[in-house]
Amino acid sequence: MQWHPVLGFMAAVIPLTLIPGTSFTLVTQQVFAGSRVDGVRVAFGSACGLLVHATFAAVGLSALVMSSARALTMVKLLGGVYLIWLGVTTWRSARRGVEPAARGRWRLPWAQLGGFGQGLWSNVLNPKAASVYLTLVPQFLTSTRPVGPQIATLAIAHITVVLVWLLFWTSVIATARTAIDTPRFRRGMSRLAGAVLVAFGVRTAAES
């Protein structure tokens, strides 16, 4: 694949990446509630979520979901419910002073993955992430070449952009945390992050 379509695709996804969303919120919450490593885990989980969407697009599954109103509605509802659950547990963890993934009986099966699992599933269940590979990626594909390798190349470019941004933001938040690291501030940030996640979840579910 030639480089100019890749560079054009990266230029197109950079503005989308810089818009604060779920991954941005999760990184912020995880670093303030835990450490820089937790933010890094969210970043790599989000990157793996994009890899899942790229794989689905390459084999045509994403196109099937997006073309089916019922399947798309189900994905949006699942994504919305997951974000709402994540937001509520984040809010409650701020009050109780524990990590959402570390709480007892209502843990999800992937809770032991911590920030990585949160970043992964929040992206896998995000229909907007899937739409990137169904509406934006095709504009940069060449019909005379195999589609799979081209999607893989664009996915690597997309993941690179996302990782650079989220890892940069992780460093910014980690630096800020050292200057204003108090229990009260951490609780406040966890509550704010929880409220934002619930808002994202409601919006995602409502769009169904």
Image (tube, grey):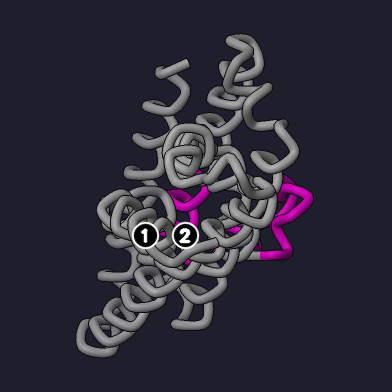
* Residue 104 on the magenta segment: yes
Could you classify mark 1 by the number of other residues whose Cα lies within 10 Å: few (under 14), some (14-19), or many (20 or more)?
Answer: some
First in residue order: circle 2 vs circle 1: 1
Please report the residue visible at 52 percent of the width from the left and 41 percent of the height from the top: 133
Q: Answer yes or no: do the residues labelled 2 and 1 have beta carbons within 8 Å? A: yes
- Pointer 1 residue: 10
Task: Classify 80 as above or below 41.
Answer: above
Q: Quadrant of residue 181?
A: bottom left
Using the image as rendered, state which of residue 95 and residue 17 is in the foreground. Answer: 17
Q: Is residue 40 above or below residue 96?
A: below
- Is residue 97 at least partly visible in the picture? yes
Q: Which residue is mark 2?
A: 158
The amino acid on which the numbered mark 2 sits, given as a three-letter code, is His
Answer few, some or many: residues within 10 Å of disc 2's Cα (few below 14, many 20 plus, some between 14 and 19). Answer: many
Q: Residue furthest front?
A: 144
Q: Position of residue 26 (x, y in %)?
A: 43, 59
The local secondary structure at tag 2 comes to helix
The stretch in magenta equals 88-113
* Left or right: 188, with 43 as reference point: left
Identify residue type, mark 1: Met
Image point 37% across, 27% down: which residue? 203
Q: Is residue 12 above or below residue 45?
A: above
Q: Tag 1, which secondary structure?
A: helix
